[in-house]
Image (cartoon, grey):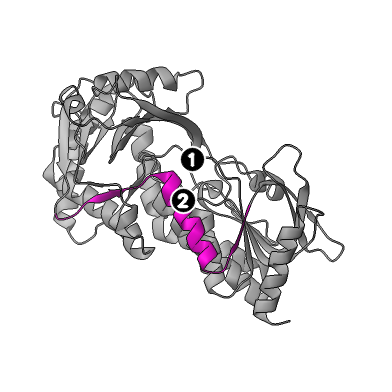
Amino acid sequence: MNGSQDKAARSASLAAWAVAPQQAQYDVVVVGGGPSGSTAAADLARKGRSVLLIDRGGRIKPCGGAVPPALIREFEIPDSLLVAHVTSARMVSPSNQEVDMPIEDGYVGMVDRDVFDEWLRERARACGAERVTGTFERIDRSADGVAVVHFSGQSDDAPTHAVRARAVIGADGAQSVVARTALPDVPPAPYVYAYHEIVRSPVGTDAAKAPKFDPARCDVYYQGKLSPDFYGWVFPHGDTTSIGTGTALRGFSLRNATSALRDAAGLGGAMTLRREGAPIPMKPMKRWDNQRDVLLAGDAAGVVAPASGEGIYYAMVGGRFAADAVQAFLETGNASELAGARRRFMRAHGRVFWVLGIMQKFWYSSDRRRERFVSICRDKDVQKLTWESYMNKKLVRKKPMAHVRIFFKDLAHLLGLVRA
């Protein structure tokens, strides 16, 4: 059977599932159709692998939606997906001191996750991956040891389907069922719980009622009353705006905090379009594979940046690394190739995650420290290096004296030698 005949046969088996479960076989089954899973599915399909992409559908992850230029370049994202171009950020301290951080010679793109994620899934399909809407249930083994992935349709009475897979990529979010099923011995990543409300952006006469709102600026509130260990945000998305906050502290009311944030931003009366919440991991898991044929990617692997909560770029990079590792595994049959995804990711971004983790633990621990943190953001060296690192996704090494100046300024703040 040639490649086109084989693909046609698999498509026929997908259609037949509505009548009776079949066990079609794929090189790779990807569970989860967010940025990470869709990227992995597209990359593997481009390499000529037979790929089945399973996504639950009908769910939008709460997300600020920021995508840096590095993501737009590396993953060939069309400008049509950007609903806003942000050119500055405003940091707001516990005492309501405001520090603006303009972006020189660039911008941060903003995307709506429902449209963005669906575009990525469709790109994977256009590359040759097959899509199916369903909910992952479990992985078991056939008599010959091959992984059998079970998933159900969307309706309550939908039958369970089963497919064979030479490899499985679990990209099904922070509380990954694939991870619990295939890597029960690996502790899950710690996480914060994020909640946001999508509101209609003020225009015309409504804009006059929200003088603090700027459609080209992201506002970040570092205030303990809005989050005891994270931050609150107001991120413009063109016609809509994301307003939310997050915390790892159980019992803290994110809805009440978001309501207070809306009032502070002058958006309390804006029309609410939808409300969403989800856990966001804050640390990469110690191991991403089961040392046999299953590999995690994206939030399932814990690759969201501490302190900032940025996840889209790291999810897509993790998906790409997962695709490369699975391709190497399929070519060689050597399961140790799967560990290469985590090694590559930590080599490229581990230091940034380490720095951000320390920053979150220290600066977000009290309002007194948050006040000093926002004060530091006034520094032009801090602003320039922060934006250069964020926009290009690498630590800036070319300006050693700027780093030295920042070190001594940070030290002065830590020792309380300067006023916030």
Query: Label 2 belongs to which residue?
Result: 117
Q: Amino acid at mark 1?
A: Ile
User: Can residue 272 be seen from the camera position used here?
Assistant: yes
Up/down of 162 relative to 76, above or below: above
> Secondary structure beneath disc 2?
helix
Q: Are marks 1 and 2 in contact (CB under 8 Å)?
A: yes
| Percent coordinates x, y for residue 345 in the rendering | 46, 59
Magenta span covers which residues? 105-132
Up/down of 207 relative to 40, above or below: above
User: Residue 119 lies in magenta, yes or no?
Assistant: yes
Which residue is the extreme one toward the bottom?
A: 2
Query: Label 1 belongs to which residue?
Result: 60
> Secondary structure beneath disc 1?
loop
Q: Choose top left, top right, bottom left or bottom right for residue 393.
A: bottom left
**In the foreground, 78 or 318:** 78
Q: Which residue: 68% across, 60% down?
A: 291
Quarter in which the C terminus is drawn: top left
Specify whether 132 is left or right of 161: left
| Percent coordinates x, y for residue 216 in the rendering | 20, 41
Q: Which residue: 62% across, 42% down?
A: 187
